[in-house]
Image: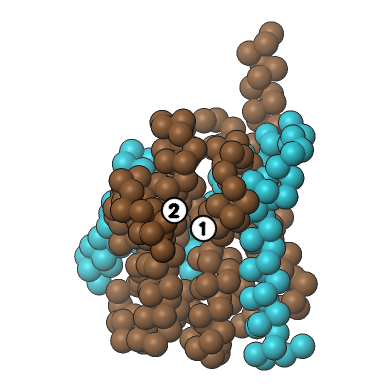
Chain colours: A cyan, B brown
Amino acid sequence: MEGALKLWAIIVLVGALNYASRLSFIAIFARRSIPPLLARALRFVPAAMLTALIVPMVVMPSGTIEPLSPRVVAALVAAVVAFRARSTLATLAAGMLALWIIQAIGG
Amino acid sequence: MTGLRQLIASPDFRAGFVEMLPACIGLIPFGLVCGVGAQAAGADALAAFGLSTIIFSGAAQILALQLYAAGAPLAIVVLTCFVLGLRLLMYSAAMAPHLASLSPRWQRGLAFLLTDQAFAAAIRRFNATHDPRRGAHYFLGCGVALWTTWQSTNLAGYFAGNLIPVSWSLDFAVPLCFIALVAPLFRTAPNVTAALVAAVAVLAFGALPMKLNLVVAGVLGIVAGTLAELAGERWKAR
């Protein structure tokens, strides 16, 4: 399968699975209790999955690992702000400003 | 229509909408990046709109587009996006007791609007009010604000994203939006363990094709967090 048809297949299948996940315990399995081990494991999905997404975007934006790039420093600044303020807007502002300042100084 | 008008006039709906606005402003660059990504991957305007309305998840949209552009098989794209979307299962489980007394129509509607940002705001409200109807109105306000922002910024990114200078590094807004969600979780040792293991694994398995390192790192991180929590409880029980 190629091109536009494949993209629509992705949209429909990923969309359907996403909606099924959102609806799962609210409606589909509402009358069943969650197995305790599954409930425990699910609580670590955000920390694990979001970190797995973030790290490559920050550490290797161009495909090779750069441990001390402006992006890494800016991401650490943003993480400290996010930890304390719990605000998307404050995190975004701190991270983008840090990146722009470091890039301006570094040339 | 009077029902709808009453709903929109309700103080809880308005509070949800207004309190979500700062997060919506923070999501503007992310939405733009998703629109640009759709355009760069060769999607037509209708498919770009389908991505943002039907999938309605920035992380899944970005990942699906990257894998599509790299020519990954359909099954791999769907599997990777499903593992990424496992956190929606967790949100659904946490939300379920608060929505149990509502009608199926409300449940289906609110489930459609269940995103990282709406979940974080609405679960705080539900825990504070203990009134399912008022909490649901607040949740709906959050969801409508996010949905509107997401569709308009995705479309703007698709049609006008190439006007944004590359030197602004707008793509960096994507990891920043995720950092805003994940960093506040680092208050417990098992969450920190899950994140550390996922971070090391995603780099260590970087050679795997088609971003399978994401799936491997996610699963290893979940297992590590679960084991760390169990070990911590056993330690305390001694």
Which quadrant would the C terminus of chain B be assigned to in this image? top right
Percent coordinates x, y for residue B94 in the rendering:
59, 39
Vertical comparison of A71 with A36: above or below: below
Rendered residue at 59%/48% (across/down): B103
- Which amino acid lies under the numbered mark 2 shown in the image of this protein? Leu
Q: Is residue A27 visible?
A: yes
Q: Is residue A102 visible?
A: no
The crowd level at tag 2 (other Cα within 10 Å; few <14, some 14-19, many 20+) is many
* Gap between marks 1 and 2 measured at Cα: 8 Å
The crowd level at tag 1 (other Cα within 10 Å; few <14, some 14-19, many 20+) is many
Output the chain of dot 2: B
Rendered residue at 69%/36% (across/down): A39
Determine which residue is flagged by label 2: B140
Rendered residue at 59%/39% (across/down): B101
Task: State left or right for residue B124 relative to residue B198.
Answer: left
- Which amino acid lies under the numbered mark 1 shown in the image of this protein? Leu
Residue B113 is tagged as: 1
Output the chain of dot 1: B
Q: Secondary structure at mark 2?
A: helix
Q: Secondary structure at mark 1?
A: loop
Rendered residue at 27%/57% (across/down): A93
Q: Earlier in the sequence, mark 1 or mark 2?
A: 1
